[in-house]
């Protein structure tokens, strides 16, 4: 399944990073993915059933990095098998909707699930989606920023609709993973060859164009 995302190149891939999307139903996970992988958006998006993934290959520091983004249902009854979903994930995007307080209040639960099923070194970004709907905002950016800081997560507000920060959010996670993997390659090259690679062992990333601003952990940006 999952064809090539736009920007994919017919070249060798140096690194593959699995990133999982999680959060309540209708917060915009599938549309964030559609925006990132195909630069598409749909207002009448249907609830996801089961699991899907899409890929997009980026160049980071002269390496071809394939981001493999997994998306499942926010609704419990439609969800994929939890352990399989998180297996091998090196990054996660925790999504809530800035216009629905409950979706933010559930974030600690999603974080708990993530921490109990995923690798402990997984790189996590909290994303407050639908920031185009500023007039319907009920979750202050400061609340989310504070939570992210306390939990050691990156944080950005995004809009799949107008593309605000979607690219930045994924690049933030991918670049952090890339840097961790590079460091590990330098420091612990032998450990990775012993047949028990850590789940952060693997691939690399390069960001095309000028260097991207990476938000500090717990720092937010957004608002157009
Ligand atoms: P599940 O698959 O049920 O878990 O939901 P989901 O999180 O994948 O939500 P989905 O991407 O299907 O989006 C739900 C609704 O929100 C759709 O009507 C989207 O068009 C809309 N939506 C998604 N992102 C945005 C956004 O950034 N801004 C606005 N205004 N609407 C959005
Ligand atoms: Mg969905």
Image: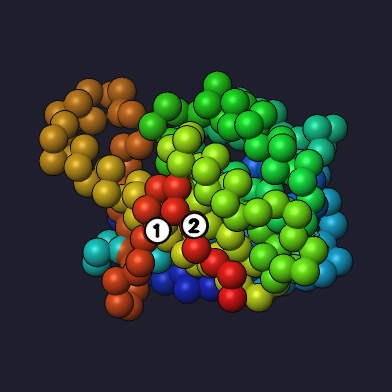
Q: In the depicted view, which residue is nearer to us: 154 or 89?
A: 154
The residue sitting at 65% across, 42% down in the picture is 22
Q: Is residue 17 above or below residue 191?
A: below
Q: Number of marks in the image?
A: 2
Residue 212, position as x, y percentages in the image: 35, 69
Q: Secondary structure at mark 1?
A: loop
State which quadrant residue 60 falls in: bottom left
Residue under pointer 1: 215
Task: Give the quadrant of the C terminus.
Answer: bottom right
Display colour scheme: rainbow
Marks 1/2: CA–CA distance? 7 Å
Residue 70, position as x, y percentages in the image: 60, 47
Left or right of residue 175, residue 44 in this image: right
Evaluate whether residue 34 shows in this view: no
Residue under pointer 2: 220
Sooner in the amino-acid sequence: mark 1 or mark 2:
1
Q: Secondary structure at mark 2?
A: loop
Residue 159, position as x, y percentages in the image: 65, 67
Left or right of residue 86, residue 202 in this image: left
Q: How many residues crowd around disc 2 within 10 Å: few (fewer than 14), some, or many (20 or more)?
A: many
Q: Contact (CB < 8 A) between labels 1 and 2?
A: yes
């Amino acid at each position: 399944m999952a064809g090539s995302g736009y920007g994919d190149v017919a070249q060798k891939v140096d690194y593959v990073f699995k990133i999982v999307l999680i959060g309540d139903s209708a917060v915009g996970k599938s549309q964030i993915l559609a925006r990132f992988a195909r630069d598409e958006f749909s207002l009448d998006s249907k609830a996801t059933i089961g699991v899907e993934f899409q890929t997009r290959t980026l160049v980071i520091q002269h390496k071809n990095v394939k981001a493999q983004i997994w998306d499942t249902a926010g609704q419990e009854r439609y969800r994929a098998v939890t352990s399989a979903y998180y297996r091998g994930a090196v990054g996660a995007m925790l999504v809530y909707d800035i216009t629905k307080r409950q979706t933010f209040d559930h974030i600690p639960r999603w974080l708990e699930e993530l921490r109990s099923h995923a690798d402990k070194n997984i790189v996590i970004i909290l994303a407050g989606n639908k920031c185009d709907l500023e007039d319907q905002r009920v979750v202050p950016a400061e609340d989310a920023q504070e939570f992210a800081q306390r939990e050691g997560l990156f944080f950005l507000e995004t809009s799949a609709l107008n593309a605000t920060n979607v690219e930045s959010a994924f690049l933030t996670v991918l670049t952090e993973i890339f840097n961790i993997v590079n460091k590990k390659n330098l420091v612990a090259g032998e450990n990775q060859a012993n047949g028990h690679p850590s789940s952060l062992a693997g691939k690399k990333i390069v960001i095309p164009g000028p260097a991207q601003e990476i938000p500090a952990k717990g720092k937010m940006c957004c608002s157009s």
